[in-house]
Image: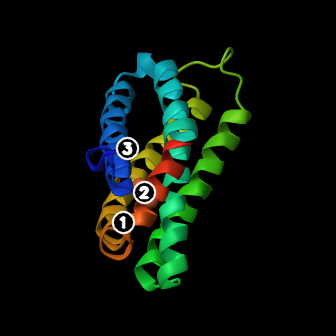
Amino acid sequence: MELSDFVHPVDILLEEHRKISRYITNFSDLLENPDEWEAAIQNAVKLINHDFVQHERREAILVDELEELMGKIGPLEMVEKEHRQLDSLRKRFNLALEKMDLSTVSGDDPEVLELLEIGNRLIWAKKSHFFKDERFLFAAARGALAPERLQEITWKMEAI
Ligand SMILES: [Fe+2]
Ligand SMILES: [Fe+2]
């Protein structure tokens, strides 16, 4: 493999942060128009249960590598704590979604509003969490991991 083909695993994750941030803006635009509630729900489900999950699985590879190397140091613990908080918000979102029959509700039903409120909270919590990933997790990864480990992490991420 040419050296120029190498993609740093942190760059893969940063690109996902950028992509997800753009989707979050679309979701917020939908929320501003009550007639777009069905599209807003679809958008939230895709973000929360697909894009977020895929990103988290890739990021977990990096977290595991760093913990193996450095132990459970404070900054990594803080990032992991936020991951757990985001997970529990996701569970709340999916529980609210399961209880609803989207074919019979309308945009001003309290359950729709509650679902969108949880989705909105989770999506913005995720966006503000990106700062911690970048400041602590990604900075540690750039400084601590040996080049041969980086390549293997990238391959593992690309396989997801
Ligand atoms: Fe992240
Ligand atoms: Fe994260």
Q: Is residue 22 above or below residue 37?
A: below
Q: Is residue 36 above or below residue 132?
A: above
Amino acid of disc 1: Pro
The residue at 48%/63% (across/down) is: 62
Q: Position of residue 131 (x, y in %)?
A: 30, 61
Q: Residue beneath label 2, please?
A: 151
Callouts 2 and 1 close, C-beta under 8 Å: yes
User: Which of the 4 image quadrants contains residue 84?
Assistant: bottom right
Label 1 secondary element? helix
Give the foreground label among 3 and 1.
1
The residue at 33%/49% (across/down) is: 6
Q: Residue beneath label 3, please?
A: 16
Whichever of labels 3 and 1 marks the residue nearer the N terminus, that label is 3
Distance (Cα) linking label 2 and label 3: 18 Å
Q: Is mark 3 within 8 Å of ligand 1?
A: yes
Q: Residue beneath label 1, please?
A: 147
Amino acid of disc 3: Glu
The residue at 50%/36% (across/down) is: 116
Q: Is residue 50 visible in this depiction of the protein? A: yes
The residue at 44%/42% (across/down) is: 120
Label 2 secondary element? helix
